[in-house]
Amino acid sequence: MSFDLMVFDPGVAPRERAAFMQWYEQQTEWAEDHDYDDPAVASPALQRWFADMVQYFPPMNGPLADPDAAGPEVTDHCIGRHVIYSAFAWPVAKQAHARMRELAILHGVGFFHASDLHGELLFPDLPPPPPRKRPWWRFW
């Protein structure tokens, strides 16, 4: 099991949560006619986000993957035209969440906390919701 987060193109994603969740389900069927490990298929803003993100969490697969890379930071990034879904190792969950959210804001893309049923849904032109006191996965 992984810690899953997603960034997305805010110009195509529905803003109402129920509609967004339906769109999210469609996106994660991975039915587009391309490989899902090449950042060249993504929108320009997502490509810029990805170029920064892989400096901290390198890809497990694809043209930018380093076969010698090891460690919990190596991440499975699934890249669609309008989304990048990243599956992180749990030991780096806190750092991954902070970095991914920070870079989403910087690059003007949306952010979705996919590991939480009621996860944060952030659009770049809307104020962010207040942070939760304790992450949902921390129970101690």
Image (cartoon, rainbow, N blue to C red):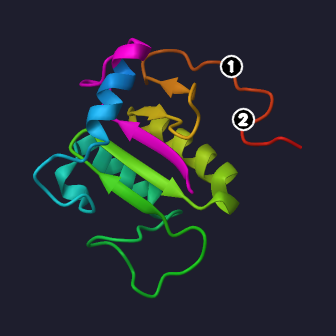
The Cα–Cα distance between marks 1 and 2, rounded to whole angstroms, is 14 Å
The image position of residue 14, as x and y in percent, is 31, 18
**Amino acid at circle 2:** Trp
Amino acid on which the number 1 mark rests in the picture = Pro
Is residue 8 covered in magenta? yes
Above or below — where is 50 with respect to 105?
below
Q: Secondary structure at mark 2?
A: loop
Question: Outermost residue, left direction?
Answer: 33
Q: Is residue 65 magenta?
A: no
Q: How many marks?
A: 2
Q: Residues within 10 Å of mark 1 (few under 14, many from 20)?
A: few
Q: Which mark is residue 136?
A: 2
Horizontal arrangement in the rendering, residue 99 relative to residue 108 (left or right):
right
Q: Can you give x and y, in whole percent of width and height, for residue 7 in the image?
A: 41, 39
Q: Residue at x 25, y 38 (%)?
A: 82
Q: Residue furthest bottom?
A: 68
In depth, the one of 19 and 98 nearer the eye is: 19
Please report the residue visible at 54 percent of the width from the left and 58 percent of the height from the top. 88
Residue at numbered disc 1:
130
Q: Which mark is residue 105?
A: none
Q: Position of residue 23 (x, y in %)?
A: 30, 26
Residue at (26, 24) in percent of width and height = 11
| Residue range corresponding to the magenta coloring | 1-19
Which quadrant would the N terminus be assigned to in this image? bottom right
Choose between 71 and 56: the one closer to the eye: 71
- Return the disc, 1 or 2, that comes first in the chain's sequence: 1
Question: In this image, 134 relative to 6: left or right?
Answer: right
Q: Residue at x 72, y 42 (%)?
A: 137
Local SS, label 1: loop
Q: Quadrant of the C terminus?
A: top right
Eye-nearest disc, 1 or 2? 2
Quarter assignment of residue 83: top left
